[in-house]
Amino acid sequence: MAASPKQVSQVTEVSPGRASDKMEETATKSSNFQATTATAVASTEREEEHHDLSRLKRMKTNFGDRPECFKNTFQEISFVFQATVATATTSFLMGVGMIITVPVSQDLGMTQGEIAWISASTSLVAGAFQLALGQLADLLGRKPMFIAGMATFSAFALLVAFSQNPFWMLVVCGILGGCSAMVVPPAIGVLGAAYTTPSKRKNMAFSAFSAGNPLGFVFGIVLCGIATQLSSWRAAFIMLCIIWAVFTVHAIWAVPSVESFDRAPLKQRLGRLKEFDYVGTILTIFGTGMFTAGLTLGPEDGWAKAHVIALIIVGVALLVIFVVWEKFFPTPLMPLHIWKDRNFSLIIGVVILGMMSFTASSFWTAFFLQEIKQFTTLMVAVHLLPMAIAGLLWNIIAGRILHSVNNTAIMIFGSVCYLAASLLFSFIRPDTSYWAMMFPALILNVAGADFQFNVANMYVMQSLPKHQQSLAGGIFNMVIRLSNTAIMGISTAVFSSVEMTAEGMADPMIKFTRTFQVSVALSAVGLLLAVFIRLGTQGNHPEEEERQEVEKEDKNHSENSTVAVESTRDSELEEKKA
């Protein structure tokens, strides 16, 4: 049936209206879509910008701000280098004493026992005075003591170079040990007081500082070995004098005044000496001195000699009395409460065992190269050079992982490195390839030292308050120095006893193998203790959790913006289909 003209007219009139409405509705939806999309995009851009800024802020916060005591970053780096040199001073001397044994014995006519005292005297005096000097640094001033220690070390190193007889040399070497003890506690005190907030910056500073002990020993061998080869053993000490004189002048600017007291006149500060533990000082000096002297004399004079037994027994007795005294004195040299911390005691024990293994294996390796391989001092230095290079690399790695890797795992890894290195050393024969055994052993040995010292230094410094940071460093370095002296006595006793047997006379290598096996035993015990340490990570910034929350919120905002844009696009597609 055909439509009437009137119906057609109505349809014609209605259709344009509906089309217009449809177009308006489509335009409105399109406009809304564009507005929603623009809003979502703008929001996303703002969030991305905010995220970038937050990320930069977090990166800066995570790395840490420069401590206020440093005027600029160059001064900060300079001081950290000075602190590293300070902690390397005593071990540097030990390396020197080891590399010059042959030329100095020929020049001054020293016996084997007198040669052993070159290194023993420095470690003995340094260990005996560490606690007392640590407390004095906190009471009277860290910077003045640091500068005085560097200056006197330089002066007495020059005196050693002009030694005319063994007695002169050994006495001045002992004084050098006291000078080296003067620089370590104030360096640690300033470092601990300056870097109060955990951060990656603090980790890097402490990792550099921790490298001082193992690397000082290696660089002492390398640098003084070169000087001795090119000139004489006296040139090695003249070189020490010049280097430490430069460091003394540099320290006047580089070391900041970070003290445990408010600025006051010297007379007023001297009044604080009333708090000094004089009785504890006397007990530690004589106790540690007699004990380590007995350990040093034992291998040469015989362990059954009356004076050796008396020195060890009286030394131990004085140290026991010292512990009892510290329990009652109000401002003790060594606060006993820190030993109640299970982790503190275990960490110190593991580090001591590891360092004893490191010192013994390094010393007898160098002696093996001189006596069995008949290398010159320069060739010994070249063969031990990988320890120095690897030590620097391992130390950088250690400083970068303290805040992210479980520190118990790091301590265990360090003990495994010590054990593996000692085992490799124990299998070395005169005809063994250097690259097959000794080279990897040197790399692993210094790895153990670097990793464990990084963890230990961080934990020890956190165990005592800010005003006792130098004392904390004194405690740690005292046990290290005394353990070095003890292991030299023990390993020398093993070396001498095996040397006099029929087996030792028939095979000159067997005495070295037995000393390396001592290192194996020490590192194995250290590994057994390390598994009982319970540590997380160290050096995390206190705002770590807050940063993680911010990152979570940023992620949620980003996901919400993406959902909004996708929802709007779906609406547009549906409209087009309709």
Image (spheres, rainbow, N blue to C red):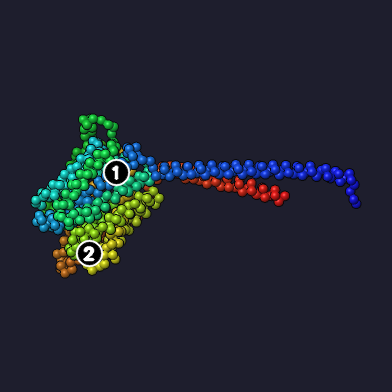
> What x and y, as percent, mark residue 436?
29, 66
| Left or right: where 78 falls relative to 111 | right
Q: Residue at x 26, y 52 (%)?
A: 215
Q: Which of marks 1 and 2 is nearer the N terminus?
A: 1
Q: Residues within 10 Å of mark 1 (few under 14, many from 20)?
A: some
How far apart in space, not on screen, are marks 1 and 2 (Cα)? 42 Å
> In the picture, residue 267 is in which quadrant?
top left
Task: Find disc 1 in the rendering and name its residue.
Answer: 78
* Of 292 and 341, the residue lying toward us: 292
Q: Pinpoint residue 285: horizontal percent, then vertical percent.
A: 18, 44
In the rendered image, is residue 70 in sight? yes
Quadrant in which residue 258 is drawn: top left
Q: Label 2 is placed on what type of residue?
A: Thr
According to the image, label 2 marks what residue? 513
Displayed quadrant of residue 36: top right
Seen from the viewer's position, the closer of residues 437 and 130 is 437
- Left or right, 401 with respect to 21, comes to left
Q: Residue at x 22, y 64 (%)?
A: 513
Mark number for residue 89? none
Instruction: Please say if 425 is above or below 80.
Output: below
Q: In this orientation, which residue lies closer to the viewer: 308 or 250?
A: 250
Structural crowding at the residue carrying mark 2, measured as other residues with C-alpha within 10 Å and reported as few (<14), some (14–19) or many (≥20): many
**Residue 32's x, y, as percent?**
66, 42
Q: In this view, does 91 lie to the left or right of 575?
A: left
Question: Would you say 196 lies left or right of 149 here?
Answer: right
The answer to whether residue 329 shows anywhere in this view is: no
Identity, as a three-letter code, of the amino acid under mark 1: Ser
**Residue 437 place in picture, x, y as percent:** 28, 64
